[in-house]
Image: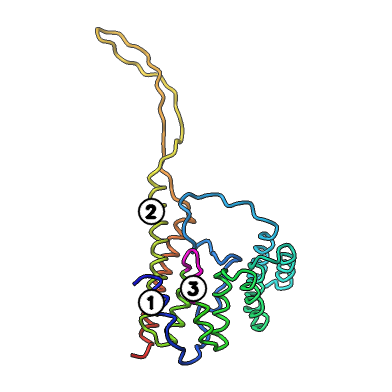
């Protein structure tokens, strides 16, 4: 079944009962919703563009949120909003901070503002879906999660997991299974790309040292001739520990989702 047909099948139907707080609702991502260990591996290893003042403030605010330095976080997010009120990331993280603090009314306003300034910002719909699920607004939560999946440029696996959970609350076994399968497929593709990158890296060699020497070569009929030679000593490369750790994290996450899928499907009434 194609992704478009999957999403259509998930939209059809109505929610039977409000879902309880979902396991994924307290997950926190960075300002652009792209956690470095969960993004598609950039095989070309391009250097990122120099961040703007706005982006620096938002990233610093994320660090402050993770450290529970709330006053500092809100101050930097306010500064970012003043710099560029037309970008959604600061509003998004404003909402995330309030969400973590259980200040749901403020979080809701911030997520809606992020959607207002950029209706195609998938992360805002994802966070809003989690909040609506917590509030028991099952229909809005499902529709928002579905929209986050549709708008996601890089097919975020977390969005699909949330959609799978919300589908399970609706009793939609097929939708739950398909959403989980797509999330697992995304992670498997990333794992495979990282595995290939590690293999390619470790097949390469680097020049360790170059020696200049002289060899004696025997001449036909007798005598010896000195010939200059160059010797090159090489060593194989070792993939960075961060690449190996990323591959392991992806492997563990795939196993976790496989188990989560099985448990979730088992809990859906026949």
The one nearer the camera, 45 or 219, is: 45
Quarter occupied by residue 100: bottom right
Is the C-beta separation of discs 2 and 3 under 8 Å?
no
**267 lies left or right of 18:** left
| C-alpha gap between disc 2 and disc 3 | 26 Å
Q: Position of residue 129 (x, y in %)?
A: 54, 79
Label disc, if present, on residue 28 of the rendered structure: none
- Earlier sequence position, callout 2 versus callout 3: 3
Dot 1 lies on which element? helix
Label disc, if present, on residue 196 of the rendered structure: 2
Label disc, if present, on residue 159 of the rendered structure: 3
- Earlier sequence position, callout 3 versus callout 1: 3
* Segment colored magenta: 146-156
Residue pictured at 66% horizontal, 78% vertical: 98
Which residue bears the numbered disc 1?
A: 259
The one nearer the camera, 204 or 270, is: 270
Q: Position of residue 96 (x, y in %)?
A: 62, 74
Q: Position of residue 138 (x, y in %)?
A: 51, 87
């Amino acid at each position: 079944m194609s992704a478009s047909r999957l999403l259509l099948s998930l939209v059809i139907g109505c929610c039977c009962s409000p879902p309880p707080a979902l396991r994924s609702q307290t997950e926190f991502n960075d300002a652009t919703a792209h956690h470095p260990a969960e993004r598609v591996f950039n095989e070309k290893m391009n250097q990122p563009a120099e961040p703007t003042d706005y982006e620096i403030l938002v990233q610093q605010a994320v660090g402050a949120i993770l450290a529970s330095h709330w006053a500092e976080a809100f101050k930097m997010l306010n500064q970012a909003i003043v710099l560029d009120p037309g970008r959604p990331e600061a509003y998004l993280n404003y909402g995330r901070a309030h969400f973590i603090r259980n200040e749901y009314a403020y979080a809701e306003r911030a997520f809606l503002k992020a959607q207002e300034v950029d209706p195609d910002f998938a992360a805002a719909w994802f966070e809003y879906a989690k909040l609506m699920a917590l509030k028991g607004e099952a229909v809005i939560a499902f529709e928002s999660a579905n929209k986050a999946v549709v708008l996601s440029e890089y097919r975020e696996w977390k969005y699909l997991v949330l959609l799978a959970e919300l589908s399970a609350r609706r009793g939609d076994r097929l939708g739950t299974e398909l959403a989980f399968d797509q999330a697992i497929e995304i992670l498997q593709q990333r794992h495979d790309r990282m595995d290939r990158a590690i293999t390619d890296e470790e097949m390469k060699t680097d020049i360790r040292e170059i020696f200049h020497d002289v060899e004696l070569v025997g001449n036909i009929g007798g005598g010896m001739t000195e010939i200059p030679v160059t010797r090159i000593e090489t060593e194989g490369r070792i993939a960075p520990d961060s690449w190996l750790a990323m591959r392991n994290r992806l492997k563990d996450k795939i196993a976790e989702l496989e188990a989560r899928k099985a448990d979730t499907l088992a809990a859906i009434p026949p």
